[in-house]
Amino acid sequence: MYRLNCFHLTYLKRVPNPSYDANSFKGSQVLSNNLHKKFHRVLEEVYNSIDKPEDYLLYVDGDTSKRNSPGFNSEKYLARCIDSILKQTLKEIEIILINDGSSKVELTKIQAKVKSYNNIYDMAQTILDCLKEKKIEKFYLLGHSMGGMIVQEMAKLAGERIIKLICYGTGPVGDIPGRFETMEESRKKLKKNGLEITAHRIAKTWFIEEDKSKYFYLCEDAGKATSIAAADNALIAMKNWSGLENLKNIKNPTLIIWGDQDKAYNFDQVDTLNKNIPNSELKIIEGCSHNVHLEKPDEFNEVVKYFLAEAFKI
């Protein structure tokens, strides 16, 4: 895995038969001498390791006659930069974008490049494809909230590969009966109020102490880090999904975890899972809402540890 830490990204241009010259990066207004050296080493490592030397990544600052380091406020090249990375022949590469006060325009361009799905099947299949690529044949699986729907779908698609299954704070129906609001209401409010207000409002429902909870910020920040399109796709995916018919076919040992004050999934949801998945057990943790693992982490970990103890010989 090659990891490029892209500070202020500009356009990455593919050039045939490049001559790599560290001196071309000197005199940058953005990078200090030390950072310049580190950045040079990263590029050199990629250049020396890449499968085809002609598919070389050259940082330019718009004008191809000038080989400069990543430039400040070069947002017009951002989309082209990301596209050029994704089109390289080297596939196992992780792009890390560090936001140093970028404008909303820049962030929107980045978010537009992030692929999101609007159905649970594609989400489940993508994870299975990733596991296949990593040559992971058998695995233990835990899914929380919408993730619980995804792992149920994975059990339907490849149940024989799952050793043990944990469905946590989830249910068998995506358009959740008894939720604090319907998925369609959430979609309308998302479009009306925007991402930040929506992330704050929904994250509050996941904790007994709402936004006063110690770890509330983790959920709020995660919500804000996505895009309106991705958030809307997630709501569409949940609204249109049901795993009711397949519950009887899940043969894996299954643990169901639920906080007794969960505002997203009521008891009927987890009870339906427990009654219809043949080899399942339900653990209820009192005094918790949707995020048991953050409200009572020790108790949550003990429940999971006990369920997996035999497998891991704990």
Image (spheres, helix red, strand yellow):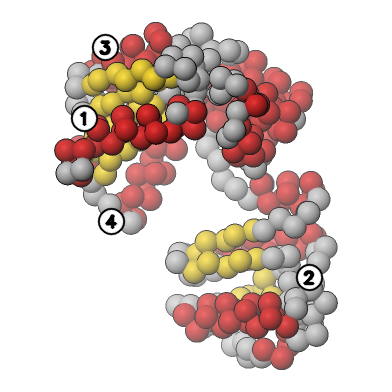
Viewport quadrant of the C terminus? top left
Q: Secondary structure at mark 1?
A: loop
- Left or right, residue 263 beside residue 165: right
Which corner quadrant of the image does residue 102 belong to? bottom right
Give neighbour class at mark 3: few <14, some 14-19, many 20+ (Cα, 10 Å).
some
Mark number, residue 71: 2
Which one is nearer the viewer's eye here, 301 or 133?
301
Question: Would you place residue 12 above or below residue 184 in this image?
Answer: below
Q: Position of residue 201 (x, y in %)?
A: 67, 24
Circle 1 residue:
252
- Left or right, residue 281 beside residue 53: left
Q: Secondary structure at mark 3?
A: helix
Circle 4 residue:
135
Alpha-carbon span between mark 1 and mark 3: 14 Å
> What's the amino acid at mark 1?
Asn
Question: Residue at the spot x=78%, y=54% of the render?
Answer: 101
Circle 3 residue:
275
Question: Would you place residue 176 above or below residue 313 in this image?
Answer: above
Q: Are marks 4 and 3 in contact (CB under 8 Å)?
A: no
From the viewer's perspective, is the residue at label 1 or at label 4 nearer? 1
Alpha-carbon span between mark 4 and mark 3: 34 Å
Alpha-carbon span between mark 1 and mark 2: 53 Å
From the viewer's perspective, is the residue at label 4 or at label 3 nearer? 3
Question: Would you place residue 177 above or below residue 241 in this image?
Answer: above
Q: Position of residue 295 (x, y in %)?
A: 49, 28
Q: Position of residue 87 (x, y in %)?
A: 56, 64
> What's the amino acid at mark 4?
Lys
Which one is nearer the viewer's eye here, 211 or 2?
211
Q: Position of residue 284 (x, y in %)?
A: 36, 17
